[in-house]
Amino acid sequence: MASTTQRWEEKEISLDILPSKIANGSKIYIGSCGSTAEASLQAMVDDWSLVNIQIIQMIPGGNLPHLSQSLDRFRTSGFFSFNRTNFFSTEERQNTECLNDYTPVGVNQITRLLQEKCVQVDVSIIKVTPPHKGFVSLGTGVEATMDFIRHSQIVIAEVNENMPWTEGPSKIPIDDIDWWISVNKPLLTTEELWPELIAGPTYPQDVMDRIGMNIVKEVPNRATIRLGVSPLIYPTIKFLRERSDLGLHTDLFNEELFQLHKEGVITNKYKTIDTGRSVVGQAYGSAELYDFCDRNPIIEFHPSSSTCDPQTLAKIDNLVSIVAALKVDVTGQVATDSIAHKFYMGLWTDEDSIRGAKFSRGGKPIIVIPSKSISGRSNIVFELPPGTGVSITRSDVEYVITEIGTAYLYGKSIRERCLALINIAHTDFRQELMHLAKENRYISMSQPGRFLSSTYPVELEAKYTTRTGKTILVRPVKATDEDNLRNFFHKLSDHSVYLRYFRKLKSMPQKILQKTADVDYSKDMAIVVQDCDDDYHHELVALGQWVSDPRGGLSELAFQVRDDWQGEGLGTFLFRRLIDIAKEQGIQHLKADVLGDNKGMNVIFERSGVKCRKRSDFGVITYLFDLDATPPDPHQDK
C-alpha cells in the first residue's frame, strides 16, 4: 500500500494538464483575494477547448482573465456584485461580459444553499500551504471554502510555499485533494489586488476622519469589533487606537486591523468566546501581514458559517458591528448593495452582523454613511430610490453615523427618526428633507425647523462632576429632545414651574417645547444636563438657554434645575457655561428676568462676578449682563 507521501506525489500535475481534469459545463469555485488561484484561472482561459464554465467567487481581486471571455466560455456568479464598483477600471468593466450574475444572499447561508443544491459546485480550485503531517492549511482563504470542498466532485489545489499556515479550523487532509500544482508566487498585496479601487475617487479625508471620531465614541474599551467588507469603513479604523483591549471577530483581516494588533490595541483579553484570539475568515494586505498570520496562535481563521453566524455573534458581549451603507431613508431603512436598479456591492454579512450585535449583551449595531455622496447627492434620503433593495430593515437599525453626528433610532417613532436623521444629514439637503417629511405627515407641520440652518455643535459637549461626585453630560439641546423636555417639565414641582414661568402651568405648551428643542445654534443656544453620560438612556435634570429677540432686543437668558437635583451646583455651572458660549459667539449683552422670590437664581447672579445692572418692577428683577466686562472665573475648570 502506497504511503501518504507517495499518494500525494502521484497527484501532482502541471498547469498545462489542469484543463484536462475539468469537464465542459463545470461549476468551479475559486478562492477570494490573495487566495484566488490565478495561475489555474489563466491556464483554463488559455485552453480553448474549455467552454460553458461557471466561476463562483466570493470577492474578486487580482488577475481574473476569465472576466474578459464571452459567456459561451466563462460566466461568473457570486455573492458580491462588483461590476459597478472601482474594483475594476471603466475600460475593464465595459469589456467584461460576465459580471452580472449576483446572488443577493448573506454569506452565512452558503452552507444551506449547497446542502439544498440551490447552489451547485463541481470543482473547487483552492490555494493552500505545502502539506504537513497529512494536512494542508487553507491559509488566509478559509471563508466558505470548506463548504464548497465538501460538495465538490473534484478538488484541485495550488500549493504555494508563500501561503501562511494559519491557526484555527483551517486545515484539510491531503486525501481530500484530487490534484495539485506547485505555484510558488508571492501572495498579492492590497495594491496588486485592487489598484483601481485604491486609485479611484474617495471621500474627503476630513469627512472620513469625522466619521471615525464619531464611531470611536460608541466603542468602549474591551469591546469586540466586527466590520463590514465595504472599503468605506477602512479609513476610520485608525481612530480605534484611542481604545484599549479590544477584541476582533470579523470576516476580513486587513492592513488597518493588523496595525491595531501590532500596537497592542487588539488583545482579545475580554472576549466572552475565543478569549485571547482574533477570529477572521480571510485576510489580505502586505507581505508583513501574511507573515504575521503564519503559525500565529493569536489569530485564527474560521469558516464563514462561524465568523458571521448571528447566534455565535450574540454570545460575544459588547460586540460592536460596523456596517457601511449606500443610502438610508429618514425612517431608517438601509441599502447596502444597490441604489435604484444598479448593484454596487453585496449583502455579504451586513444583516447578520447587525442582528448579532443587536442581541449581544452590551452590543451596538452601527450603520456608517457619509452625509453626501462622492457625486454630490444626499446619502440620507426621504425615500430610497425605486428599485433599491432594503438590506437592513428599520426595525433592526439602532445607530446611524455620519460625519455630522450620530442618530440613535432604537425604539423611536417615525417623527423622532426623521428629526434624528435629518439632524445628521448634510446641511445642503436638510430643508428639502424636512419639507418632504412634513408634506407626508411624518413630522408635524408646526415643527419650526430652526436647526436646519446650523450644524449641531458637538464641541460644546462636556462631562461634569457635581458637588456630590455625580458624573453628568452637558450638551446642546437637539430637536429630538422634545419628549425629554416634556418629561423634564412634569418632574418639576409646582413651585419650580411658577418661579420659572411666572405662572402656574399644568403642562408645557407644544410651541414652547418646539421652540426650546428646535434651535438655530448660530442665533440661540439651549444646553441640557443629562443624569448620566449615556446619550441614549438618560433623563434631563437641568436646562439653560438664551433666546434672541427677533425685534433686535437683548437675548434673554434663563435656566432651571429639577428639584431633586438642586444643591449639586448645576445652576451656577449652567450660568457660567451659557456666559462662556455667548462670549465665544460674540454676544455682548444678555438679560434675565427673575422673580424676587427666586432666591436661588438671584444668589447665583449676584455672586457670579459678571458685571450687571438690575432693576425691579412689580416683584420682577431684571438683570442686564455686560459680557465684555466679565472678569475670568478663577473657579472655572481648565
Image (cartoon, grey):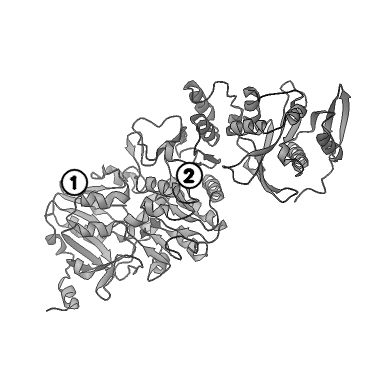
Q: Please, what secondary structure does the residue beneath circle 1 have?
A: loop
Q: Which amino acid does label 1 sit on?
A: Ser
**Which of 62 and 561 lies nearest the eye of the viewer?**
561
Q: In which quarter of the image is residue 28?
A: bottom left
Residue 319 appears in the rendering: yes
92 is higher (above) or lower (below) than 141: above
Instruction: Left or right? Give the position of 520 relative to 18.
Output: right
> The disc labelled 2 sits on which kind of residue?
Tyr
Q: In this view, does 253 lie above or below 413?
A: below
Sequence-wise, which precedes: disc 2 or disc 1?
1
Within 10 Å of the Cα at label 1, are there few (<14), some (14-19), or many (20+) other Cα atoms?
some
Q: Which of 346 and 414 is in front in this view?
A: 414
Report x, y in % for residue 634.
83, 49
Above or below, 382 relative to 171: above
On screen, 573 above or below 495? below
Neighbor class of circle 2 (other Cα within 10 Å; few <14, some 14-19, many 20+) is some
Across and down, in percent, residue 459 comes to 65, 44
Q: Specify the label residue 38 is tagged with.
A: none
Secondary structure under the numbered disc 2 in the rendered image: loop
Q: Which of 574 and 379 is in front in this view?
A: 574
Q: Which of 585 and 226 is in front in this view?
A: 226
- The answer to which image quadrant residue 623 occupies is top right
Query: Which residue is tagged 1?
Result: 70
Which residue is pictured at 33% across the width and 60% down the height?
Answer: 34
Q: Which residue is drawn at 77% across and 43% down?
A: 567
Callout 2–callout 1 Cβ contact below 8 Å: no
Q: Position of residue 258 (x, y in %)?
A: 45, 62
Residue at the location (42% across, 30% down)? 383
Could you say which quadrant of the image residue 484 lies in? top right
Q: Mark 2 points at which residue?
A: 203
Is residue 556 shown left or right of residue 596? left
Q: Is residue 285 visible?
A: no
